[in-house]
Image: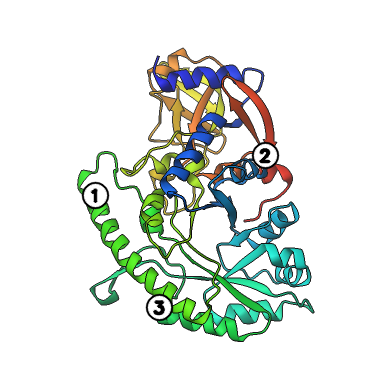
Amino acid sequence: MTARAADRARYDRATAHLDAPLAIVDLDAFDANADDLVRRAAGKPIRVASKSVRCRALLERVLAKDGFAGIMSFTLAESLWLARSGFDDILLAYPSADRTGYAELAADPKLAAAVTVMIDDPAQLKLIDDARDGGREVIRVCLELDTSLKLLGGRVRVGARRSPLHSPGQIADMARAAARLPGFKVVGIMAYEGHIAGVGDAIAGRPVRSRAVRLMQATARRELAERRAEVVRAVRAVVPDLEFVNGGGTGSVQHTAVEDAVTEIGAGSGLYVPRLFDNYTSFSGRPSALFAQPVVRRPGVGVVTVLGGGYPASGAAGPDRLPVPYLPEGLKYDPQEGPGEVQTPLLGSPADDLLLGDKVWFRHAKAGELCERFDALHLIEGDAVTATVPTYRGEGHTFL
């Protein structure tokens, strides 16, 4: 029996009393992935990206482990909710225009101490100030650096379009603008290198493209390490008591950790290991988060139909954004239909061994987005469900 077949047997036994659709997290794999992230971070604390987890119980679990400290959130409303739930170190990783949320933040000393917000434009400071509604608490702010690689005098850009602050001078000017305003305190810098951390460099069946990605990433790492160090020096000249410099991502943990300028690593997808993180030479993980759909039809030889399953991930549309049939091994989509909103035909010889009601296990393309489809995660240890915990959705929250 292969390791994957053994996992399928465990998951089927553990959930035999539960009807699909359902979602699980294999805690043995989850914990092993967490340990691997800590190993790769080489002593630097890991700030957990909540968008890649979207479950308070699992955020608590991972933050209880040595090597993890703090949350990287994705909306202001989520940040305030987490702070009210007892989390005390939350970095909002994206700028917000949530005026109501800013008013709440500025009025509550506990929230203001727990939450750091992201800025990359003086206009954001004005928006926050105008939203205070009488609140006098000091707002902690983090500056975001654009990590993109610019070549040929800027005519070629590689990387996500995030912050407009690219040079040390630009980000130092932003630090001065924030430091001059009463009611604000610059506490950190964030620089997420998505073109390194979030792009696989070992693409199945694409050796030439894979080599090109590795070359690009090696060039980008060298350029960013030098520029990030200059940026930190420039900002510390304005804000000597800077608290943190956040960098990295699941795919680049060990590379970012060696930079002296970086004090902490951001990561989250490496806990669940969705399918987009299969294509890396620098690390491998164990898929821990899966969802199951029930067989509801047997249209013919070599074909079964499962309920639903059409859960595409965000990003540029393409086959790599689709969930993938995982267990039993050997199933694939009908190319004329793909995964559907209410039904999904699956092709392959394993279909002939599946009965009505049997579970087919899938992996989502991205990590936490799976939790937007399910209100609970069944936590598996060995071959038993040992707990069932709500996702954000299960607690009544869809923050974005």
Image coordinates for residue 389, horizontal then vertical, percent: 69, 36
**Three-letter code, disc 2:** Asp
Point out the frontmost of discs 3 and 1. Answer: 3
Label 3 sits on a secondary structure element that is helix
Q: Which residue is denoted by mark 3 in the rendering?
A: 168
Mark 3 closeness class: few <14, some 14–19, many ≥20 residues within 10 Å = some
Q: Residues within 10 Å of mark 1 (few under 14, many from 20)?
A: some
Q: CA distance from mark 2 to mark 3?
A: 44 Å
Which of 368 and 246 lies nearest the eye of the viewer?
Answer: 246
CB within 8 Å, label 2 to label 3: no
Horizontal arrangement in the rendering, residue 312 relative to residue 221 (left or right): right
Q: Which comes before the other along the chain, label 2 or label 3? A: 3
Residue at horizontal 44 percent and vertical 14 percent from the top:
352
Q: Secondary structure at mark 1?
A: helix
- Give the labeled residue for mark 2: 375
Name the N-terminal-most of marks 3 and 1.
3
| Residue 136, quarter of picture | bottom right
Badge 1 amino acid: Arg
Does residue 221 appear in this view?
A: yes
x 76%, y 68%: residue: 109
How many neighbours does mark 2 have within 10 angstroms: few (below 14), some (14-19), or many (20 or more)? some
Q: Is residue 79 above or below residue 233?
A: above
Asked which secondary structure carries label 2, the reply is loop
Q: Quadrant of the N terminus?
A: top left
Q: Which residue is mark 1?
A: 209
